Image (cartoon, rainbow, N blue to C red):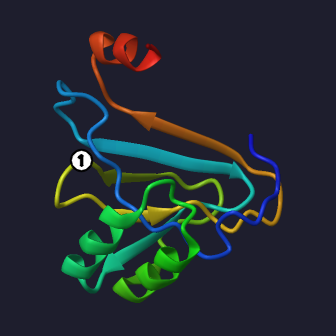
Amino acid sequence: MSPPNEDCTVPRWHVDGRYSETNEVPFKFVVSLKGPQTRFAKMINWDEFKKLSRQMETGLEMGIREKLVDTVEEIFPAEIGQGMIFRVGDDGAVVHSEPDATESRIFLSVVAGKRKDVIEMQG
């Protein structure tokens, strides 16, 4: 659960890398059970998106985030309670952002993996 915040009033458009070396299925499932859903976008300018993304260190650099907005076109594929499965980890990875969280959010994220991957992620 996450409380309301203004962290993503300007979207933090990004793609997720691979979650492990053995992750054979590079997909992620997300669903918001309460509050705003994860935002998704289609790529307009992949080269510029990659160039700007490399300049991001924390994801909080507002100037870069504002420029990234011009490299994608937001789409609205899911309603509250509907889950989304999307590709991660490579050039086919789906662009997404946390929502503009104007209310509390209950959010679930699942990444496919093997037992070894789960142990590795737990540190």
Residue under label 1: 89
Q: Is residue 19 above or below residue 5?
A: above
- The number of numbered badges drawn on the structure is 1
Q: Is residue 40 above or below residue 22?
A: below
At label 1, counting other C-alpha atoms closer than 10 Å, the crowd grade (few under 14, some 14-19, many 20 or more) is some
Q: Position of residue 71 (x, y in %)?
A: 35, 84
| Residue drawn at x 26%, y 81% as measured from the top left | 48
The answer to whether residue 109 is left or right of residue 72 is: right
| Helix, strand or loop at mark 1 | loop
User: Which quadrant is the N terminus positioned in?
Assistant: top right
Q: Is residue 85 above or below residue 14?
A: above
Viewer-nearest residue: 98 or 108: 98
The answer to whether residue 74 is left or right of residue 35 is: left
User: Which quadrant is the C terminus positioned in?
Assistant: top left
Q: Position of residue 64 (x, y in %)?
A: 46, 76
The answer to whether residue 6 is left or right of residue 51 is: right
Amino acid at circle 1: Gly
Q: Is residue 79 above or below residue 66?
A: above
| Residue drawn at x 51%, y 39% as measured from the top left | 109
Q: Position of residue 57 (x, y in %)?
A: 44, 55
Q: Position of residue 105 (x, y in %)?
A: 75, 50
